[in-house]
Amino acid sequence: MLPQAPLQPLNLRWLIAAGVEVAILRLDLIDPLISGNKWFKLTHHLAAARNAGAEGLISLGGAHSNHLHAMAAAGKRFGFSTVGLLRGHPVQTPTVLDLQAFGMELQWLGYAGYRTRHEPGFWAPWLERYPRLHPVPEGGGGLDGALGCAEIVNQARAQLSDVGWDDYDGWWLACGTGTTLAGLVLAEAGRHKVYGAMAVPAGHGVAENVADIVGTDCPCRYQLLDASRGGFAKTDAQLLAFISACEAQSGVALEPLYTGKALLALQQAVEVGHCPKGSRMIFVHTGGLQGKRASGAMLD
């Protein structure tokens, strides 16, 4: 059973001034290690692994990957093997040290090798080497990852009365691969629109990934917005000052590459009237706070 993430009012001066209500779904609070949307993404992948008779999981990510961190922590806690295929060359980061402490076997692919991850034959040698492991796409993506994230909608709906709501106008969240957004879109089935603040540039395939999962029959069910601040894992003084101010006002910890960028994109949407007075939005805190330990971390 998935742990419950609390739904809480988000009290920020710029929201109050605009007359916009936001409730934040605190996925960052569900577990100290298997945090944020990563637990939800893993549930269906783990079920698929069990059905296939696999003894563990093998997946991809970078040296600051939230996905690999959660997967390795789950493997240690629940007793299954994990292998991480990592971008770049061996480095020691707080995340990498955790992966090793959790018992994950690490394979460094270099940068050229990692770029081949979308090619048709990429997985063949790895599955030959690790025949008892179930492959999981980068970031816990794919349809299985999205179906796991669909439960996020049920968790929020069950708590609407806790924030004094009977309904809401839409969702707002950061996107790295688009898998969590796709899960919300599938669960909503057109009832409420889902807004995804892309924390990575358009060339990283978020739009294509979402379309592959949810189809293209009704693109009006969701909208993707550029929140990358000019590149992958890019931050700037405006973003960092905004995060500091919001943390001080709300007491909610944010990280600069996903949740911070998404919240700043929401403020900008409010300023231009995209979220009119009286709007009620659910903001998903997707976790990733472990990555704050490394300055300039490139998170997955």
Image: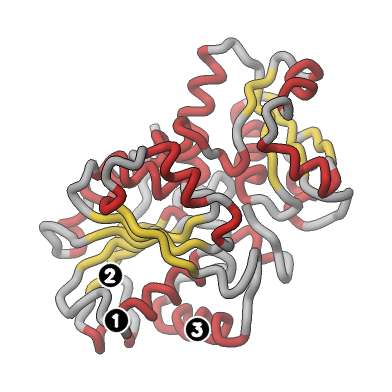
Asked if disc 3 and disc 2 are in contact, CB closer than 8 Å, the reply is no
Left or right? Give the position of 216 relative to 120.
left
Q: Distance between the residues labelled 1 and 3?
A: 13 Å
Locate residue 278, reporting x and y percent: 15, 75
Mark closer to the chain start, 3 or 2 = 2
- The vertical placement of 178 against 228, above or below, is above
Residue receiving disc 3: 242
Q: Which of marks 1 and 2 is nearer the N terminus?
A: 1
Residue 248 left/right relative to 138: left
The spot of residue 73 in percent (x, y) is 64, 40
Q: In this view, does 274 lie above or below 294?
A: below
For the N terminus, give its image quadrant.
Answer: top left
Dividing the picture into quadrants, the one containing residue 154 is: top left
Q: What element carries label 1?
A: helix
Q: Which mark is residue 22?
A: 2
Q: What residue type is labelled 3?
A: Phe
Look at 46% across and 30% down and name the residue there: 144
User: Mark 2 and mark 1 in contact (Cβ < 8 Å)?
Assistant: yes
Rendered image: mark on residue 15: 1
